Image (tube, rainbow, N blue to C red):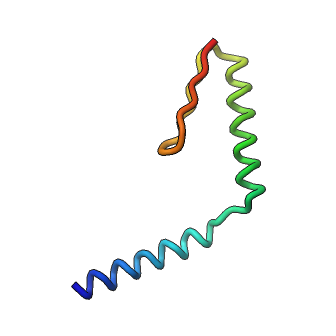
Amino acid sequence: MEKWNYLLKKKLYNMKDFIKQFKPHPVVIVGTLLVLAAVIMYSVTLKKRVEVQIPNYFIFKASD
């Protein structure tokens, strides 16, 4: 049991370090969301039906 607890804690700490390494700046997050919104708006003007799905976050559907 102690071995499992040790491995679990080790894995969680490694995951925290991994997330800390790739923590993006808020400006990057906002910029990415703006680019995504611009691409969706552009594709809606070109097509009559658009569906954008980001796994585990949201699904956007638009039709004319």
The residue sitting at 30% across, 82% down in the picture is: 5
Residue 11 located left or right of residue 41: left
Q: Picture quarter containing residue 47?
A: top right
Residue 50 coordinates in the image, percent (x, y): 59, 22
Among all residues in the image, which is located at the extreme bottom?
Answer: 2
Q: Picture quarter containing residue 18?
A: bottom right
Please tell me whether residue 54 is drawn above or below residue 1 in the rendered image. above
Among all residues in the image, which is located at the extreme left?
Answer: 1
Residue 2 located left or right of residue 49: left
- Which quarter of the rendering shows the C terminus? top right
**Number of marks in picture:** 0
Residue 12 coordinates in the image, percent (x, y): 43, 75
Residue 40 located left or right of residue 14: right
Q: Picture quarter containing residue 27?
A: bottom right
Residue 23 located left or right of residue 4: right
The residue sitting at 76% across, 48% down in the picture is: 31
- Which quarter of the rendering shows the N terminus? bottom left
Please tell me whether residue 60 is drawn above or below residue 19 in the rendered image. above
The residue sitting at 60% across, 72% down in the picture is: 20
The residue sitting at 56% across, 68% down in the picture is: 19
Residue 46 coordinates in the image, percent (x, y): 70, 17
